[in-house]
Structure formats: C-alpha cells, structure tokens
Image (tube, rainbow, N blue to C red):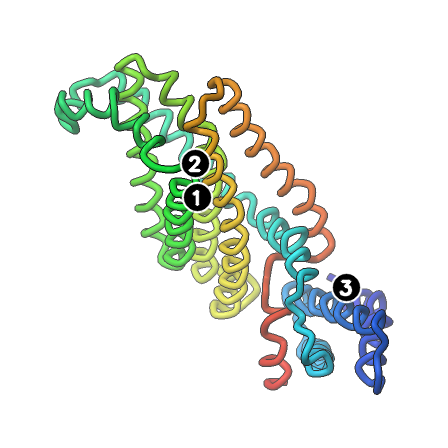
Amino acid sequence: MDLDAYVNAHLGEWQRLEQLISQRRLSGPESDELVDRYQRVATHLSVVRTSAPDAVLVGYLSSILHKARLRSIGTRVTTWRSVLLFVTDRFPAALYRLRYWWLSTMAVNVALVAIMMWWLVEHPLVEQSLLTPEQVDQLVNADFEGYYHQSVASSFALQVWVNNAWVAALCLALGVLGAPVVYLLWGNISNLAVIGSVMTRAGHGEQFWGLILPHGLLELTAVFVAAGVGLRLFWSWIEPGHRTRSQSLAHEGRTAVTVALGLVMVLLVSGVIEGFVTPSDLPTWARVGIGVLAELLFFAYVFTLGRSAYHRGYTGDLDAALLEDTVATAA
C-alpha cells in the first residue's frame, strides 16, 4: 500500500475527528458524526497496521481514537450501529479474506466422506466389525430418525445450537495447535460416513440424506469455517510472513474472535432448521430445498457483502476498535 497516498486520501477525515473532539459542546448530529468517524478511523488504523505499519502514524491515529473514546464517555461505541457494522462488514470480510482456508477444508472433508462411504458400502465386513447386527437394526429402524423427534422443537434447536457452537469453538480455540482441529474433523466425518453407509446399505439412503441435508449443509459449513480459521491460526506462527510470530498470531487470533462471534449466528440458523424443519412433515424436496437455500444465502453473504467489505479495507481484525487505548498508551 502507498502510505503517502493513503494519508492524503484520509487526512481530512482524521482532522475532522480532531475538530469534533476539541469542540466544547456537540449537537445530536455532531455526536452521531463523532461515533461514525471514530469507527472509520478505527478501520483506517487497522488497515495501516495490517498493510503498512508505521509507528508514527499508528501512534497518531491511536491518540485520536483514545481522545474520541474519552470524549464520548457515556455513549458507548458498541451500539446497535456497531452490531450492524459487524454483521455487514467485519464478519463477512473475515470470511472472505480466509475463504481459501475454509473452502479447502470443506472440499477435503467432503471428498473424504464420499470416499469413506463408498468404501464402507463396498466392504460390508468392516461394518460388521464396527457394529453388531442388533446395533445396525436399532440405528436404521429407530435411532436415526428418532433423534430428530426426541424432544420439543424449540428445546432441540437450542440443544443443537449449543452443541455445534461448542464444536466450532473448540476448532477455533485449539486451532493454534493444529492437530486437535484435524482430530475433531476426523471424528465428525468418520461418524457421518459410517452412519451414511449403514443407512444406504439398508435401503434407507433417501431417508438419511433427507434428514441430514436440510440443516447439515449450513451446519457443516460452519464447522468447516471454524476449522479452516483454526488451521490458519496454527499457520500464522509457523509462517508469519512480514510480521513477527507474535504479531501474526495476535492478528489472526483477533480475526478468529470475529469469526467465532459470527458463527454463533450461523449456527443459530442451522439449529432452528434442525429443530423445526428437519423433523417437520414437509416433503423431502421442500426440507432439502430450505437447506440448500440457507447454504446459498451464506455463500452470497460471503461473496457479495464480504468481498465488498474486504476491498474497502476490512479484514475481520477487532484490534482497531477494542485495543486502541493500549496502543495509545504505549505510543
């Protein structure tokens, strides 16, 4: 990035924020403008730190943000507008920037599931070593479908949401170590492959996919996103690039926080689908169609809003909005 050009392009905004900070009294519109410019300058600081770190400029912007935050005490920056900014810019930008990591994770896992299911169907003796005939009968005729009707839909949706959020959180939290993410993914896909092969061989393949796909498309995508971001966190200290290892790890760690918060919403949607759509009396094509629609909307969200936000300078890094006081003190 051309630092001089970036400064020339945004200096007027920084000076306007300083002017608002220095005013003794602010009108309602000016107070709103202060919050708006605070958020913009926070984004500028994030871009400078990421693309062209300059100690003097970082210190200057951090100082402005520190003063702006003190000036707006009593009116928290984390308002509904900030929540909207997170949903429309920070979270989708993080997904778009890290798209190759989680898309690769998704592709590898989908391929492995397909290969494992095909192999297990072709080798029934393996199934017999894993499950007894009684267990297979119980799974095919009762347990699999019964799982989706075991409790009230709202309670089941909450249970599913908490469980999947926990799996995603583990992928992100343990991502710095690398191996635990692979272990979690292996447990997930091997279980899916075994159940799928058992149901298919028993002539219940349509039932299996009809109950898995409505919620599973979005649910597994969220898990793959968490795993991909976790693996990127691991790689950040293996190959830090132009940053030091601590800087690279901190940057990707903050982005992982953004992704974790956003995935709570994604998994909530998949939990609602699993609790209310999957066990419903809708025809299979309608239930699967809802799942496909949810998946397409997620990809549209990433590759429209996310792409736009990314090209406007958002990376998913939370430090500019949350850590500017620390930076200003250090400067």
Q: Secondary structure at mark 1?
A: helix
**x%, y% of residue 36?**
77, 66
Q: Which mark is residue 75?
A: none
Q: Residues within 10 Å of mark 1 (few under 14, many from 20)?
A: many
User: Disc 3 marks which amino acid?
Assistant: Asp
**x%, y% of residue 158?**
42, 46
User: Disc 2 marks which amino acid?
Assistant: Gly
| C-alpha gap between disc 1 and disc 2 | 18 Å
Quarter of the picture holding the N terminus: bottom right
| C-alpha gap between disc 3 and disc 1 | 37 Å
Which residue is the site of mark 3? 2
Quarter of the picture holding the C terminus: bottom right
Q: Is residue 107 visible?
A: no
Q: Quadrant location of residue 235?
A: bottom left
Which residue is painted at 52% across and 64% down in the image?
A: 248
Which residue is the site of mark 1? 223
Q: Earlier in the sequence, mark 3 or mark 2?
A: 3
Which residue is the site of mark 2? 275
Q: In the displayed structure, would residue 10 be above or below residue 209?
A: below
Which residue is painted at 59% across and 74% down in the image?
A: 323
Which residue is painted at 63% across and 52% down in the image?
A: 87
Which residue is painted at 72% across and 51% down in the image?
A: 311
Depth check, front residue: 78 or 297: 78
Comparing labels 3 and 2, the label whose residue is closer to the camera: 2
| C-alpha gap between disc 3 and disc 2 | 51 Å
Q: Is residue 193 visible?
A: yes
Q: Secondary structure at mark 2?
A: helix
Kindly check if marks 1 and 2 are in contact, taking CB atoms under 8 A apart as contact: no
Q: In the displayed structure, would residue 272 be above or below residue 69?
A: above
Q: Earlier in the sequence, mark 3 or mark 1?
A: 3
**x%, y% of residue 271?**
45, 40
Q: Earlier in the sequence, mark 1 or mark 2?
A: 1
